[in-house]
Image (spheres, helix red, strand yellow):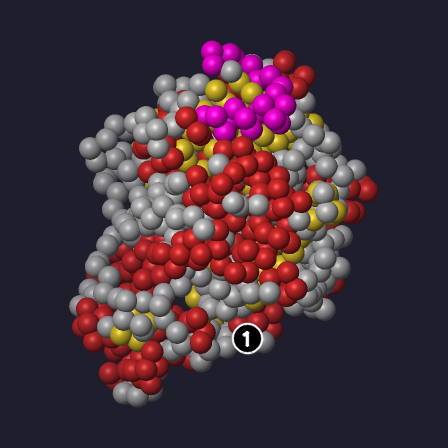
């Protein structure tokens, strides 16, 4: 089997002490340096100055929400947002000549970073059976080839359609419409690997998969818990929201396996005060938790709250809310009282005093928000952990009121919108019924493949055509060697992409690259210039208008590609007006308006500054759960355990990457420079395991009943992680993550909970 690519050698590794603050002047300077290296001053101006402004380009980075219109800064973006937008706006181009010069196998040996640096894809390319080169192909022939393959399948379920959260609502809606009209629910997406655990837990307990808070709620909370999240790097503008909340009197508690820079101290580049002073301390309390200890933490905390109510009845719990809005309290509270402190302390690595201090903060606070991300969802017990967070919120009525609620912080800028548009292999019948009413075909009802099951099905030959619209499936997915092998077994692999990545080099018998417009670019169709819409983490749907000239005249928009593909694949009698959709995106939104609750009158309302905030039923006291109430749940005790001489390894993002795409080899805030092949290990563990900082090791992951997996040639860095817990970068470590290692219920890969040993290299 082919090995995952080796990154550049790490002789240049230089480790400096981790930073204790985030953002500020150096951050802005870095953004401009990167931007000017990639593109021109004029293009930088067109993108950066309109970014996140009304009528401008939505940041293609994370899904953090924009302040209300009128409250935005001239520069309403963070350093990383600037990097992400310029990565797309780059002046570099990948042409047919590039593919003549490079074999597919040669490209397969290049690093993720090198592939991305080659620039924007410019024309459709095909790799024919047996060939080791991509060659140019016309749009007509490329879409014909794909349509023929799809039509020749024995069953529509032999195709999968992957999406990532970069695509617009309009494209996402058309993708799922096409897949379902074709006859399959095989719609795996990046969300399967991201917030799937949140969706499952919130659906089950609250009846909605989305967060319940707005930016305003955060600004007016008394207490905000930031759990398993690194906002300084991954959601930098969240720090501005936390700063504002603190100015309004909020307290912040950070729960993390690492002391992340942004959680400690923040310098706001938008304000003179931020530029000069030492910045604002963000976390009032920092709980350095052991990996996977969050379920235990919230169980311990909930037990303390119940006991506080026992001691002072009627003063701690929101009994009215519990009576009127919830079910299952008695059973939950009986169970919560049995949680043993010894277990909580071992699982969390915290002291009882630390957890009691959190309880005291909670008791002082009328309005509490809990934010969380991958440190919670990417664990075996991610779903019960989030259910326990919901228990915590319910106890004091911290839902459905201003300044309080649940805040799963989403990753990709439109990952939440994709789901709203029906990109999910398990969409409920209500959505499928609405599709049937609107378009007059019967959508398939059987659940489709999610990301993990799609890999299994490709590996077993049950899926023969893979179509990816955005993303880098091969690098995002777990078990890199297994995933690559599965892709290679396909008859046809197709990627609709803006930039070159490793997925293009891991080909089925035939492979297509279909280059597309990015969000930064002007999108002109038969009826004139189009815009698209996206939904952020706080359920706000707004428009994004591209400004730049397209990277190549040959590019088609995602919408156009999907419309033309659908028209070529489906019978004309299906009666879906694909040509009309391509010519005028407003006609797509008119259909969405009739299918998605809350988006009625979509075109008119989205034109208003700030767009549309989708209603969250929880905030109206409506719970679409099994009991019709918010559900307390009883979550069985779970703990992540690594055998002796092993560590729990989390795979995370550096400050200088976008998911599978490293921009440089530096991770400035963590003080790592010049190499990404490092493993961060607590100094006590370095000694205990007989290792030394700077030593070269292989990471070997163990999995019951499966073969060991190995990632070679990492350098040990002594780092203040929690004892027993190591960290290394994604996607270099995906090779270690067994396909079967998934979260219960959600089937999400456990990218933060791998069990590894460190083997010294000879
Ligand atoms: N610059 C940049 N921004 C991004 C991205 C990017 O790649 N680069 N990706 C986007 C996407 S798609 C996503 S989903 C988000 C991801 O945003 P995050 O979830 O912040 O991303 P990660 O780097 O995976 O970091 C997870 C954090 O959880 C902590 N952690 C790990 N295990 C545990 C645990 O068991 N308990 C607790 N309490 N903490 C733990 C880690 O130390 C780390 O701080 O970011 C989005 N924004
Ligand atoms: N080990 C480990 N694995 C993980 C994670 C982890 O923390 N650890 N995180 C998981 C998470 S949270 C996520 S979200 C996934 C991310 O998985 P993906 O979303 O699949 O990966 P990205 O790296 O965001 O995809 C980058 C590619 O998207 C394409 N692209 C960018 N913009 C556009 C566009 O506008 N249109 C089109 N058509 N293409 C575009 C470019 O070609 C680029 O190379 O990875 C998951 N995998
Ligand atoms: S916080 Fe997120 S959305 Fe905002 S500018 Fe930064 S990357 Fe873009
Ligand atoms: Mo994500």
Which residue shows up at 48% across the image and 51% down it?
A: 439
Residue at the right extreme of this rendering: 42
Q: Position of residue 726 (x, y in %)?
A: 38, 42
Between 545 and 478, the residue placed more toward the observer is: 545
Task: Tell me: residue 59, above or below residue 350.
Answer: above
Q: Quadrant of the C terminus?
A: top left
Dot 1: within a 10 Å radius of its alpha carbon, few (fewer than 14), some, or many (20 or more) residues? many
Q: How many marks?
A: 1
Which residue shows up at 75% across the image and 42% down it?
A: 548
Q: Write down the residue under mark 1.
A: 220
Q: Position of residue 728 (x, y in %)?
A: 44, 38
Q: Position of residue 611 (x, y in %)?
A: 63, 64
For label 1, the SS is loop
Between 461 and 634, the residue placed more toward the observer is: 461
**Label 1 beta carbon less than 8 Å to ligand 3:** no
Q: Position of residue 244 (x, y in %)?
A: 60, 69
Between 316 and 721, the residue placed more toward the observer is: 316
Task: Tell me: residue 315, above or below residue 449.
Answer: below
Residue 247 visible within the image = yes
Residue 114 image-quadrant placement? top right
Residue 235 magenta-highlighted: no
Residue 664 visible within the image = no
Which residue shows up at 38% across the image and 78% down it?
A: 397
Residue at the front extreme of this rendering: 573
Residue 344 image-quadrant placement? bottom left
Q: Which residues are magenta?
A: 129-149
Left or right of 406, for residue 452 = left
Residue 137 magenta-highlighted: yes
Which residue shows up at 61% across the image and 21% down it?
A: 137
Q: Quadrant of the N terminus?
A: top left
């Amino acid at each position: 089997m082919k090995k995952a690519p080796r990154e550049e050698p790490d002789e240049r590794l230089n480790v400096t002490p981790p930073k204790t603050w985030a953002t500020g002047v150096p951050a802005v300077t870095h953004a401009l340096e990167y931007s000017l290296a990639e593109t021109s001053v004029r293009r930088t101006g067109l993108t950066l100055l309109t970014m996140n402004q009304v009528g401008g380009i939505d940041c293609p980075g994370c899904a953090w929400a924009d302040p209300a219109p009128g409250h935005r800064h001239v520069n309403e973006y963070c350093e990383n947002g600037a990097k992400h937008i310029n990565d797309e706006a780059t002046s570099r181009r990948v042409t047919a000549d590039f593919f003549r010069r490079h074999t597919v196998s040669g490209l397969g040996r290049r690093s993720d970073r090198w592939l991305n640096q080659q620039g924007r894809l410019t024309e459709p390319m095909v790799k024919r059976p047996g060939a080791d080169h991509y060659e140019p192909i016309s749009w007509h022939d490329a879409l014909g080839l794909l349509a023929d393959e799809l039509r020749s399948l024995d069953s529509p379920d032999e195709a999968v359609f992957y999406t990532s959260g970069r695509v617009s609502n309009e494209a996402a809606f058309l993708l799922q419409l096409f897949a379902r009209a074709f006859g399959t629910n095989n719609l795996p997406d990046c969300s399967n690997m991201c917030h799937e655990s949140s969706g499952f837990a919130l659906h089950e307990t609250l009846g909605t998969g989305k967060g319940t808070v707005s930016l305003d709620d955060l600004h007016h909370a008394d207490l905000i818990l930031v759990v398993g999240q690194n906002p300084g790097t991954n959601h930098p503008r969240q720090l501005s929201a936390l700063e504002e909340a603190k100015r309004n009197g909020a307290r912040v508690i950070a729960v993390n396996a690492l002391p992340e820079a942004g959680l400690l101290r923040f310098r706001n580049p938008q304000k003179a005060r931020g530029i000069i002073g030492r910045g604002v301390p963000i976390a009032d309390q920092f709980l350095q938790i052991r990996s996977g200890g969050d379920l235990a933490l919230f169980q311990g905390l909930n037990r303390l709250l119940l006991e506080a109510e026992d001691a002072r009845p009627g003063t701690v719990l929101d009994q009215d809310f519990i009576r009127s809005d919830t079910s299952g309290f008695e059973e939950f509270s009986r169970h919560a009282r049995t949680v043993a402190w010894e277990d909580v302390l071992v699982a969390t690595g915290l002291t009882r005093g630390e957890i009691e201090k959190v309880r005291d903060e909670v008791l002082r606070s009328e309005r509490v928000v809990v934010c969380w991300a991958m440190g919670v969802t990417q664990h075996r017990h991610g779903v019960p952990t989030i259910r326990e967070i919901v228990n915590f919120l319910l106890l004091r009525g911290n839902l459905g009121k201003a300044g309080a609620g649940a805040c799963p912080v989403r990753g990709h800028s439109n990952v939440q919108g994709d789901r709203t548009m029906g990109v999910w292999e398990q969409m409920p019948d209500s959505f499928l019924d609405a599709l049937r009413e609107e378009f007059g075909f019967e959508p398939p009802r059987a659940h489709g493949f999610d990301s993990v099951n799609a890999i299994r099905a490709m590996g077993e030959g049950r899926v023969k055509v893979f179509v990816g619209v955005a993303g880098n499936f091969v690098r995002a997915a777990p078990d890199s060697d297994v995933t690559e092998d599965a892709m290679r077994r396909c008859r046809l692999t197709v990627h609709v992409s803006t930039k070159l990545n490793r997925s293009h080099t891991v080909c089925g018998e035939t492979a297509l690259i279909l280059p597309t417009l990015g969000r930064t670019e002007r999108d002109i169709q038969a009826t004139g210039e189009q815009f698209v819409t996206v939904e952020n983490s706080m359920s706000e749907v707004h428009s994004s208008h591209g400004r730049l000239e397209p990277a190549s005249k040959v590019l088609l928009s995602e919408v156009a590609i999907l419309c033309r593909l659908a028209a070529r694949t489906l019978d004309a009698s299906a009666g879906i007006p694909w040509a009309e959709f391509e010519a005028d995106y407003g006609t797509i939104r008119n259909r969405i308006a009739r299918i998605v609750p809350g988006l009625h009158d979509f075109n008119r309302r989205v034109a208003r500054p700030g767009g549309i905030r989708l209603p969250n039923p929880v905030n109206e006291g409506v719970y679409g759960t099994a009991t019709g109430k918010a559900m307390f749940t009883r979550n069985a005790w779970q703990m992540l355990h690594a055998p002796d001489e092993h560590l729990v390894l989390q795979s995370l993002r550096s400050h200088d990457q976008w998911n599978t795409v490293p921009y440089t080899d530096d991770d400035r805030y963590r003080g790592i420079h010049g190499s990404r092949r490092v493993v961060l290990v607590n100094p006590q563990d370095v000694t205990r395991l007989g290792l030394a900082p700077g030593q070269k090791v292989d990471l070997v992951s163990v999995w019951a009943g499966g073969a060991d997996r190995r990632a070679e040639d990492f350098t040990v860095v002594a780092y203040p992680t929690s004892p027993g817990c190591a960290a290394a970068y994604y996607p270099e470590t995906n090779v270690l993550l067994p396909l079967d290692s998934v979260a219960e219920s959600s089937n999400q890969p456990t990218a933060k909970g791998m069990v590894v040993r460190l083997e010294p290299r000879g």
